[in-house]
Image (spheres, rainbow, N blue to C red):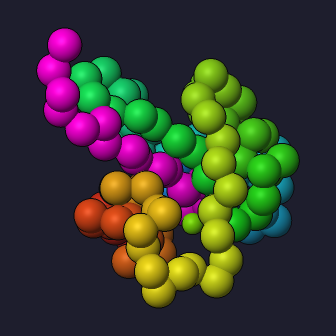
Amino acid sequence: MSSRKIISIAFDCDETLWSNGIYGGVHDGKPNVPIVNLFRALERLPHTKMYVWSHGGQEWAEQVAIECNLQNYEIIEKPFPIPEDKSNMPDIAVDDIDDLGKLLTLFVE
Ligand SMILES: [Mg+2]
């Protein structure tokens, strides 16, 4: 077995996995399909561990994960405010807020 490090990757919900509608509710928005597909592509790589998180809280992240058919992935708490010290953050963040990941943030516009 390879000793290669597991890369943790956390995907944000609002305006990342989820395109929010004008009212912001789950019945108003829709999955952001290219980003959901990116999640699935990265999940297929060996040595990745995928997470969903949201500043909207655990319950909101669970709802979005279900709507995006990502309900089998772990939901983790997203710290707010964003810590200066990134040592406990996921290696990679995919997010519409910059500077979240320990190694890098794939910024979604
Ligand atoms: Mg967001």
Say above or below: 87 vs 32: below
Give yes or no for residue 14 being in the magenta stretch.
Answer: yes
Residue 109 percent across, percent down from the top left: 38, 70
Magenta stretch, overall SS: loop
Residue appearing at x 18%, y 32% in the figure? 4
Indicate which quadrant contains ligand 1: bottom right
Residue appearing at x 16%, y 21% in the figure? 2
Residue 65 relative to residue 6: left or right: right
Give yes or no for residue 81 being in the magenta stretch.
Answer: no
Residue 76 percent across, percent down from the top left: 65, 48
Residue 8 percent across, percent down from the top left: 39, 45
Figure quadrant of residue 41: top left
Q: Is residue 42 visible?
A: no
Figure quadrant of residue 56: bottom right
Q: Is residue 73 visible?
A: yes
Say above or below: 84 vs 26: below
Report the magenta residues as a range.
Answer: 1-15
Residue appearing at x 66%, y 42% in the figure? 75
Q: How many labels were placed on the picture? A: 0
Residue 63 percent across, percent down from the top left: 77, 40
Q: Residue furthest top?
A: 1
Q: Nearer the viewer, residue 28 or 66?
A: 66
Q: Nearer the viewer, residue 28 or 86?
A: 86
- Quarter of the image where the N terminus is located: top left
Say above or below: 100 vs 60: below
Residue 38 relative to residue 53: left or right: left
Q: Nearer the viewer, residue 100 or 27?
A: 100
Say above or below: 105 vs 53: below
Residue appearing at x 42%, y 73% in the figure? 86
Q: Nearer the viewer, residue 107 or 93?
A: 93
